[in-house]
Image: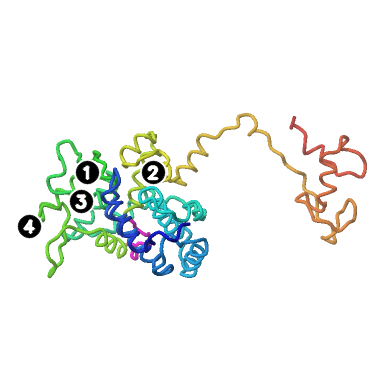
């Protein structure tokens, strides 16, 4: 590495990287992603200090990993921070032509494979029943929840809607989703009805579809944190953790379970690849049980039964009645595993001194 060249402070490079993400890429990253990047860069800067980006080495990576692990963060968060550092190093190499540590030298941990979080139909019914619709706040929350379940939108997408965004005749709206991609989303009469009811309760002229209704607060567009805070309150009363993204996954899981092709789901959810959509689709255990009970059939094989004759336990309970040895007992009571398997596999099952299995095997061919 040529140390005679001007060194670049990591913090300065990180700021340039954020500007590049917003204005230098073909597709600008989302605002929420920029905020997340900024927080991650702050954490990395605390560990490596004012070190030049050219001077970063494997020891700095180890210290960063150590710092995150000692904070008792999840492996998923560690993966996220190290991936961000990789992206910054790649930016240095490819966009700024700065000689730095190769990005692949930053080893990523294996991400935890978590089950997809979604709600079954009975859970959805419980969530809906817990929402009190006697106030405008409750009506607004019902419209928001129904909007999630009907359209599968992200929380930022749903809250970005204006009064004029929805075509009530067509039951649809055009939105700008993640990666500045435009797509069409659809609503059913259920969610449209709650949105109309909510708008009928409002006396303001704010263009946003969902707004804040707290005394003393300036009238403004409803924020994601406001929705999450309300959902946390209801979660405590019903014992179900309600999350906006889990409602989005519920939309995907229910459609997929009812036979909707994964590529149609990809278009509805606004994903860049089918692989991402596949990670959104959960498995409803109730549906699984029903499928096993209704779709599995082994025909005549199910008519055969294997009823092992009852053999009493040896009096000592710890010795095989056949060989007298103290061995691990088999389910065929009183016999050890060895004697049982000898009898089971013996060519002449009625040989004297060997467990007689012939009566139990009659009818099985």
Residue that protrudes farthest toward the right in the picture: 352
Specify whether 345 is left or right of 42.
Answer: right
Label 1 vs 2, first from the N-terminus = 1
From this view, report whether residue 264 is shown above or below residue 210.
Answer: above
Mark number for residue 160? 3
From this view, report whether residue 25 is shown above or below residue 305.
Answer: below
Q: How is the image coloured?
A: rainbow
* Residue found 20% across the figure and 51% down from its top: 160
Asked if labels 2 and 1 touch by Cβ distance under 8 angstroms, the answer is no
Q: Classify 10 Å Cα crowding around label 4: few (below 14), some (14-19), many (20 and above).
A: few
* Residue found 15% across the figure and 40% down from its top: 168
Q: Which residue is mark 4?
A: 204
- Residue at mark 2 to residue at mark 3: CA–CA distance: 24 Å
Specify whether 55 is left or right of 28.
Answer: right
Q: What segment carries the magenta color?
A: 235-243
Asked if labels 1 and 3 touch by Cβ distance under 8 angstroms, the answer is yes
Q: Which residue is mark 2?
A: 253
Classify the position of the C terminus by image quarter: top right
Q: Mark 4: which secondary structure?
A: loop
- Residue at mark 3 to residue at mark 4: CA–CA distance: 17 Å
Tell me where residue 264 sits by quadrant: top left
Q: Which residue is mark 1?
A: 175
Label 3 vs 4, first from the N-terminus = 3
Q: Is residue 207 magenta?
A: no
Label 2 vs 4, first from the N-terminus = 4
Q: Front-most of 61 and 344?
A: 61
Q: Classify 10 Å Cα crowding around label 1: few (below 14), some (14-19), many (20 and above).
A: some
User: Which x, y percent locates residue 106?
Assistant: 49, 56
Q: Front-most of 182 and 359?
A: 182
Asked if labels 3 and 2 touch by Cβ distance under 8 angstroms, the answer is no
């Amino acid at each position: 590495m040529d140390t005679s060249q001007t060194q670049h402070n990591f913090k300065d490079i990180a700021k340039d990287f954020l500007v590049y993400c917003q204005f230098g890429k073909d597709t600008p990253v989302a605002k929420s992603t920029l905020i997340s990047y900024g927080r991650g860069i702050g954490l990395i800067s605390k560990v490596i200090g004012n070190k030049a980006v050219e001077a970063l080495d494997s020891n700095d990576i180890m210290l960063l990993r150590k710092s995150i692990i000692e904070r008792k963060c999840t492996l998923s968060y560690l993966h996220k921070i190290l991936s961000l550092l990789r992206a910054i190093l790649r930016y240095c190499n490819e966009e700024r032509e700065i000689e730095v540590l190769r990005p692949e030298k930053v080893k990523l941990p294996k991400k935890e494979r978590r089950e997809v979080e979604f709600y079954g139909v009975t859970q959805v019914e419980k969530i809906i029943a817990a929402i009190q619709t006697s106030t405008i706040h409750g009506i607004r929350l019902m419209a928001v929840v129904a909007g999630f379940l009907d359209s599968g939108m992200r929380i930022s997408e749903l809250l970005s809607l204006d009064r004029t965004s929805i075509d009530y005749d067509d039951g649809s709206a055009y939105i700008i989703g993640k990666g500045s991609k435009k797509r069409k989303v659809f609503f059913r009469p259920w969610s449209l009805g709650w949105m109309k009811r909510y708008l009928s309760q409002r006396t303001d002229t704010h263009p946003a579809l969902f707004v804040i209704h707290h005394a003393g607060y300036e009238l403004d567009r409803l924020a994601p944190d406001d929705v999450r805070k309300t959902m946390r309150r209801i979660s405590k009363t019903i014992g179900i953790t309600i999350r906006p993204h889990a409602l989005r996954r519920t939309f995907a899981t229910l459609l997929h379970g009812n036979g909707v092709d994964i590529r149609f789901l990809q278009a509805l959810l606004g994903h860049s690849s089918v692989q991402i959509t596949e990670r959104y689709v959960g498995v409803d255990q109730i549906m699984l049980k029903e499928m096993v009970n209704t779709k599995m059939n082994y025909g005549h094989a199910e008519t055969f039964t294997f009823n092992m004759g009852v053999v009493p336990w040896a009096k000592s309970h710890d010795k095989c009645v056949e060989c007298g040895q103290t061995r691990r007992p088999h389910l065929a009571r009183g016999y050890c595993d060895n004697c049982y398997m000898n009898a089971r596999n013996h060519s002449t099952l009625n040989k004297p001194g060997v467990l007689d299995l012939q009566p139990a095997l009659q009818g099985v061919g």
